[in-house]
Amino acid sequence: MQLLPLAIIQSLLLAGGQVFLKLALQRMLPFGWNWQFWGDLLTNWQFALCGLLYGAGTVLWFYIIKHFPFSMAYPMVSLSYVFGMIAAMLVFHEEVSLTRWLGVLLIMAGCYFIAK
């Protein structure tokens, strides 16, 4: 069960990166190959935080795949879907249907059995 807490933290970092990427892109002008678009992107603090979260998640992923069997570690990445669903509700105020919650419960059960 040592893998599970690390996988949860890594998944939180990945989901957090996705949330901040979406927040950054919502503030941006439409995509363009011009200096204004790229300047806005590179000075957007949400985009910078997105990169930091992805970077931290990647470093933790290095540790996980070095120390745990890949067949156990890789499915644990799916926990990021669970945290993404929660973020969709809390941050973006999206409605989540019952069938999506059922899918989340199946993902959580699968991760539990893989880690056990």
Image (tube, helix red, strand yellow):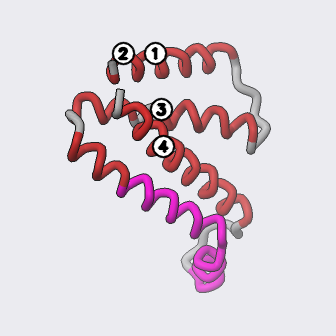
Percent across and percent down for residue 27 are 73, 64
| Label 1: which secondary element | helix
Mark 1 lies on residue: 109
Residue at x 55% of width, y 30% of height = 82
Q: Alpha carbon of mark 1 to alpha carbon of mark 4: how far?
A: 17 Å
Identify residue type, mark 1: Ala
Q: Alpha carbon of mark 2 to alpha carbon of mark 1: how far?
A: 6 Å
Give the residues in magenta: 34-59
Q: Residues within 10 Å of mark 3 (few under 14, many from 20)?
A: many
Q: Alpha carbon of mark 4 to alpha carbon of mark 3: how far?
A: 10 Å
Percent across and percent down for residue 70 are 22, 35
Q: Residues within 10 Å of mark 2 (few under 14, many from 20)?
A: few
Image quarter of residue 95: top right
Mark 3 lies on residue: 79
Identify residue type, mark 3: Leu
Q: Alpha carbon of mark 2 to alpha carbon of mark 3: how far?
A: 13 Å
Mark 2 lies on residue: 113
Residue at x 37% of width, y 51% of height = 60
| Label 2: which secondary element | helix
Percent across and percent down for residue 94 are 75, 34
* Mark sitting on residue 10: none
Residue at x 27% of width, y 29% of height = 72
